[in-house]
Image: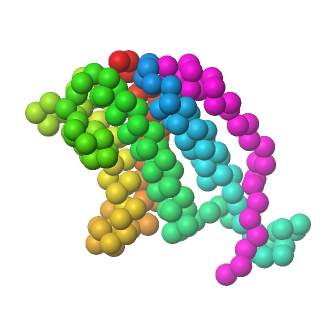
Amino acid sequence: MAADFFFINPTFTIQSLKPVAVFKWQRLGNPEVQYAIAAEEQYLNFHLFMLNNIRHTQASQISQPPYVYELGLSVRAGAVKAAVLIAASIVEAALRALAEARGYPLNENPLRRTFGNVIRAWEVNKAPRNEVAAIWANVKAMHEVRNFVHLHKAAHDLEAEWGKVLQSEEALLQGALNAIEHVAHIGV
């Protein structure tokens, strides 16, 4: 089915990288990671803007649309999963930088410092450390949704089904944003 796409609100302000990297993420003490996170956060904000503002109508009818619909169904679920993937990358990078600076138990091989490895470093006896306890359920949810990129695994997981993703869209996205803001305030 062909459709024309447009933004209900076409204006978006892209935040500069430097203030986000230098001020928001300063507690990481790692400028390279701070700038990498700032770039991803900049795109995440744009991605969420698109998700919230994109609409579609009948192809070739954009000047006088017979209908205006939000993005929906499996396409919207894909956009939600992409947003969670980006947010998870931000949280993973920040928690890894902090864990490395604090000497938490990570895999000796930096190539094996996966999100799961970083998560385990922030646990003591399978319980989250105090600094992350308030967002731990969000971190675990992001890790689970992020793993839906493994489509063979996702095909056999009822939680990965697009309808389930849409049912939990608000909780997933808000939880991801809360986790980002929380982690930005943790210091070395």
Please tell me whether residue 156 is drawn above or below residue 186 in the rendered image. Answer: below
6 sits left or right of 102 in the view: right
107 sits left or right of 11 in the view: left
Please tell me which residue is depicted at 24% across the width and 32% down the height of the picture: 122
Quarter-of-image position of residue 17:
top right
The image shows residue 25 at horizontal and vertical percentages of 50, 24
Residue lying furthest front: 109
Residue lying furthest bottom: 1
Please tell me which residue is depicted at 35% across the width and 18% down the height of the picture: 188
**Looking at the image, what colour scheme do you see?**
rainbow
52 or 66: nearer the viewer: 52
Quarter-of-image position of residue 64:
bottom right
Please tell me which residue is depicted at 73% across the width and 36% down the height of the picture: 13
Please tell me which residue is depicted at 74% across the width and 41% down the height of the picture: 12
21 or 52: nearer the viewer: 21
10 sits left or right of 139 in the view: right
The image shows residue 8 at horizontal and vertical percentages of 75, 53
- Can residue 118 be seen here? The reply is yes
Please tell me whether residue 172 is drawn above or below residue 183 in the rendered image. Answer: below
Q: How many labels, in total?
A: 0
Residue segment shown in magenta: 1-26
Residue 7 lies in the magenta-colored region: yes
From the image, which quarter does the N terminus lie in? bottom right
The image shows residue 121 at horizontal and vertical percentages of 22, 34
Residue lying furthest left: 125
- Can residue 164 be seen here? The reply is no
The image shows residue 186 at horizontal and vertical percentages of 38, 21
